[in-house]
Image (cartoon, rainbow, N blue to C red):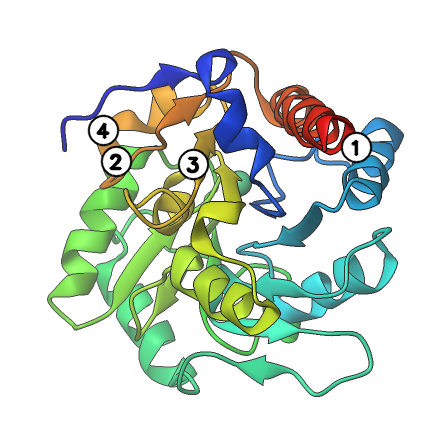
Amino acid sequence: MSQTLRPFADAPRDRLARIRLIATDIDGTMTRKGKLNADVLTAIVQLADAGVEVLPVTGRPAGEALGLARYLPCVREAIAENGAVLVRPDQDVITLWNPPDRALLTRVAAEVAAPNSPLHLAEDAFCRVGDVAFLREGRGDAEIAALAERGRAHDVFVIWSSVHIHFSLQSPDKGAAVLSVSAERGVQPDQILTIGDAPNDVGLWIPGRFGLTVGTADVHSHAAALSHKPEWVCDAKGADAWLMMAQRVLQAVTSQTGAG
Ligand SMILES: [Mg+2]
């Protein structure tokens, strides 16, 4: 799909000022060398104080997302496994997809993998409830896209992040999950900013769904594998991009509050 990636620095201030929810990928988007650092945690608190909540939307498993929802400041819930489940501390896990047939997904994964390059189950498999994930182990986008094509012949969906390759029986769609959760909160789609870095974030970037859709600079390297691209792209990667986004939202929202 032909689509212009515009610099996030040019995103209109009035659209930024409407944002009340930031639906964000974690790995490669909020992280620096795989970790969440103090500057990011501080920004989450500053945003919350200004009336903007952060909603993690990750391909990581339900068990790990529950830890994010429990321990990140000012975060009350998280979407895990690319939209398969919603986790809230001290509540039963809320499944947004039908339960997966793990044996079938594992069998298909073994069939579609190249004979000399078998897929190895992600080490976090024990805390997944909605999909089956495998390690990327250095595979590039083109190689995984070929896997995905073979998966489609088995009615299986394959999507990938910066860390994992996910197999599921339902089309992964982080954005649909965000719309479901935000509607429950009474947040309008134009009050939502989404941000991600990799092919499993395409549901966050579908045009017309959200107020602003943002990518880190990594979207340039994944461009050929993206069915949808963000409207806006940062000129930095990972936490540096995320903090740039957070500060612009914060400035827009607080200046509006000050004017009101
Ligand atoms: Mg990511």
1 vs 2, front mark? 1
Please tell me whether residue 84 is drawn above or below residue 75 in the rendered image. Answer: below
State the residue in front, 24 or 221. 24
Query: What residue would you read off at disc 4?
Result: 224
At mark 3, the secondary structure is: strand
As drawn, the label of residue 213 is 3
Q: Amino acid at mark 1?
A: Val
116 displayed left or right of 67: left
Q: Are marks 2 and 3 in contact (CB under 8 Å)?
A: no
As drawn, the label of residue 225 is 2
Q: Amino acid at mark 2?
A: Ala
How far apart in space, not on screen, are marks 1 and 2 (Cα)?
28 Å
First in sequence: mark 1 or mark 2? 1
How far apart in space, not on screen, are marks 1 and 4 (Cα)?
30 Å
Does the rendering let one see residue 87?
Answer: yes
Q: Quadrant of residue 85?
A: bottom right
